[in-house]
Image (cartoon, rainbow, N blue to C red):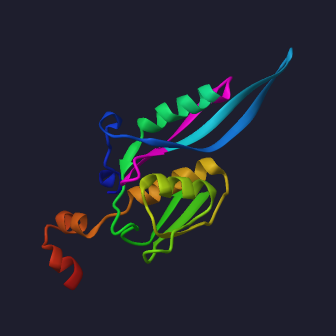
Amino acid sequence: MALSNIKRVKSSEIELKDRLVSIQRVAKVTKGGRTFSFSAIVVVGDENGIVGYGLGKAKEVTEAITKGIDDAKKNLVKVPIIKGTVPHAQYGKYSGGSVLIKPAVGGTGVLAGGAMRAVLESAGIKDVLAKSLGSSNPHNVVKATVAALSDMRDAYTVAQHRGVDLNKVFNG
């Protein structure tokens, strides 16, 4: 059920902005000493309801970021946005990362921290209340946030899924 809700998007048709969430230097210990490389997690979005994330690994920082952007463009999803906020409260989980996203009144802004903020702003959400409840690992927080956003449905989608009129969704 949740997988049927995800709407994949082609990256060639839209102008995407990228945001670096986190970059780590990782070391591989060999007989000759330590070999350093970099891993970067990047979020891309058009700030109009489309968002994706990607991971890039390379010997250089710029190469890792470029690989992350390319990976993010392959994993784009469409997010429902109503009047600059999310349609309803949603809980998302990925591994140890758990997030709670709630709609907010206009003028509130994006009340979210670090990795969640990058995802929500890239998606184009202007007013939202969000809290990271589990792990603070940016990889898991980003994946949990995207999972929560992709599980959201607006009233029109719910009416279409149930096969009823839009009025019946609100008024019973």
**Residue 152 vs residue 126: left or right?**
left
Examine the image and state in which quarter residue 76 appears.
top left
Numbered range of the magenta stretch? 44-61
Q: Position of residue 42 (x, y in %)?
A: 55, 41
User: Does the magenta-highlighted stretch encompass residue 105?
Assistant: no
Examine the image and state in which quarter residue 159 appears.
bottom left
User: Does the magenta-highlighted stretch encompass residue 56?
Assistant: yes
Of all residues, the one furthest to the front in this rendering is 107
Q: Position of residue 22 (x, y in %)?
A: 65, 44
Q: Quadrant of the C terminus?
A: bottom left
Q: Position of residue 106 (x, y in %)?
A: 43, 75
Q: Answer above or below: position of 104 versus 118.
A: below
Residue for point 59% across, 51% down: 140
Of residues 142 and 46, the one nearer the viewer is 46
Of residues 61 and 134, the one nearer the viewer is 61
**Residue 50 vs residue 143: left or right?**
left
Of all residues, the one furthest to the bottom in this rendering is 171
Q: Quadrant of the N terminus?
A: bottom left
Residue 165 appears anywhere in the view: yes
Q: Position of residue 143 (x, y in %)?
A: 52, 50
Q: Answer above or below: position of 96 versus 46.
A: below
